[in-house]
Every structure is written in C-alpha cells, then in structure tokens.
Amino acid sequence: MQRFDALPADLRLWMAQAALPWSVHSVMKLWVKVLRRARGDRAAALKALSVIERRALERDVARIWGQGHPFLTGHACPHPSGVAGQTPFPAHHSFANSATWD
C-alpha cells in the first residue's frame, strides 16, 4: 500500500478507475515511458495509459470471447465514463472529485 500511496495523485486516481488490475510496478514502468513520450504533459500521459489499457482489453476480449463480443463491436464500455482516469459521475455529485469514499 505504501508503494501505491507514493504514486502521483493523478496516477493513483487513474489506477483506481482503471478497468484492469494494474500492479504498482507495471503502471509506474509504463507511466515513466508515456510521460517521457508526452514531454511531461500529464494529461497526455494519462490518456496514453488509457489507450494502452483499451488495447490490452481488446486483445484479451478477442482472444477469450471472440470478435463478436459487445466490447469489440462498440456496444459495451469497460468503464462507466468511457475512459479510465475520468470520473463517471457528474461534477455536481459531492463525491465526484474525491479520491476517498469516507
């Protein structure tokens, strides 16, 4: 848990909303790579992580359930907002921008 807590806040939020169960080690390794490619643009790096996750999901869904699965035909979404790292709740909800569920 200490390694997770040591991650940047925006990356912790992305992990908390990700569709896949990323390890701290693997997400940090990818984070360094995509952040470097994005020249320090954190929003672009988070978007790149979501693209990487979506591609992994597409590969695994096709391999496990086949090309007709709703995820691959556009009839399903792996995350309520459509993109990991974005809150699925409207901003007017009191918990929409909170990192904790007290």
Image (cartoon, rainbow, N blue to C red):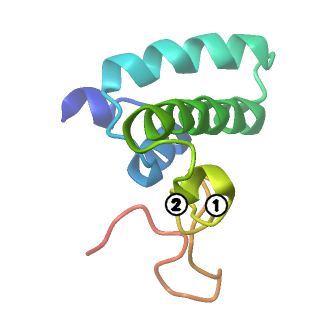
Label of residue 22 in the image: none
Q: Position of residue 77 (x, y in %)?
A: 57, 61
Q: Can you see residue 91? A: yes
Q: Position of residue 68 (x, y in %)?
A: 56, 52
- If the image is split into quadrants, where does the C terminus sit? bottom left
Q: Nearer the viewer, residue 71 or 6?
A: 71
Position of residue 14 in the picture relative to residue 24 (left or right): right
Q: Could you tell me if the residues under marks 1 and 2 are in contact, i.e. CB atoms within 8 Å?
A: yes
Answer above or below: position of 55 versus 65. Answer: above
Q: Residue at x 60, y 32 (%)?
A: 55
Q: Can you see residue 8? A: no
Judging from the image, what secondary structure is the residue with disc 2 in? loop
Q: Which residue is mark 1?
A: 82
Q: Residue at x 26, y 26 (%)?
A: 3
Q: Nearer the viewer, residue 46 or 7?
A: 46
Judging from the image, what secondary structure is the residue with disc 1 in? loop
- Amino acid found under the numbered disc labelled 2: His
Answer above or below: position of 4 versus 35. Answer: below
- If the image is split into quadrants, where does the N terminus sit? top left
Task: Give the crowd class for mark 2: few <14, some 14-19, many >=20 residues within 10 Å.
Answer: some
Answer above or below: position of 5 versus 90. Answer: above
Q: Nearer the viewer, residue 97 or 74?
A: 74
Q: Residue at x 70, y 38 (%)?
A: 47
Position of residue 64 in the picture relative to residue 93 (left or right): left
Label of residue 79 in the image: 2
Residue furthest to the left = 1
Answer above or below: position of 31 versus 20. Answer: above
- Amino acid found under the numbered disc labelled 1: Gly
Q: Position of residue 89 (x, y in %)?
A: 57, 78
Q: Residue at x 65, y 80 (%)?
A: 91
Disc 1 to disc 2, how far (Cα)? Answer: 5 Å
Q: Quadrant of residue 75?
A: bottom right
